[in-house]
Image (cartoon, rainbow, N blue to C red):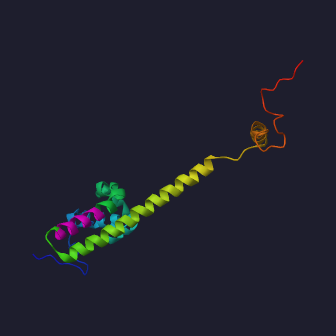
Amino acid sequence: MSVNFDLFGNPVRDGHGKRGRPPFEVTPEKSNKIRLGLALGWSNDRIANAIACSPATLKRYFRAELAERTMARDQMELRRFELIMAEANKGNVGAIKELGRMLERNDSVLAGQRFDDAQRRGQEQTKAAKPLGKKEAAQLAAETAGGEGSLWGEDLTPGFGRPN
């Protein structure tokens, strides 16, 4: 008996003469599709729609894959670098050029992240330094009064005792 496929390459299940809906089948192809969807930043609903199941079924059968959501993009990028590097090591000139472009892109992304981190740290420091209140400002002014260039001169300088 041959297996029929639909327009998108999914096998068509035969359900004639059987009661109920057939159970969901987990395949390596579906698992890879889910990992690719996660790497592309898709939502669970969109991934479930792509593999023709409900979001609940997706969560039930592919819990391990969904738990790797935060790592999926980095894993895909690393795999791309790995494949291009393997071809470049074989001497493929096109792969060497593509590796150079990928490295430049990666360096620009890293520089942008460092810049954003520095800006965030600067914003946090400015938020942390709260403005002085009236009493703190008066205390600071009193401590610095009488210094060089002051109108008070040396009148406020400590150490000059009055004779009795």
Q: Is residue 84 magenta?
A: yes
Q: Is residue 8 visible?
A: yes
Q: Is residue 154 left or right of residue 67?
A: right
* Total tally of numbered discs in the picture: 0
Q: Is residue 73 left or right of residue 91?
A: right
Q: Quadrant of the C terminus?
A: top right
Percent position (x, y) of residue 58?
33, 61
Using the image as rendered, state which of residue 14 and residue 51 is in the foreground.
51
Tell me which residue sits at (26%, 74%) in the image.
Answer: 98
Q: Is residue 142 magenta?
A: no
Tell me which residue sits at (29%, 60%) in the image.
Answer: 75
Tell me which residue sits at (32%, 56%) in the image.
Answer: 68
- Figure check: 77 above or below 7: above
Q: Quadrant of the N terminus?
A: bottom left
Residue occupying the far bottom of the picture: 7
Q: What type of secondary structure mainly makes up the magenta span?
A: helix
Q: Which residues are magenta?
A: 76-88
- Figure check: 110 above or below 140: below
Q: Is residue 57 visible?
A: no
Where is residue 105, by image quadrant? Answer: bottom left
Tell me which residue sits at (17%, 75%) in the image.
Answer: 92
Percent position (x, y) of residue 11?
20, 74
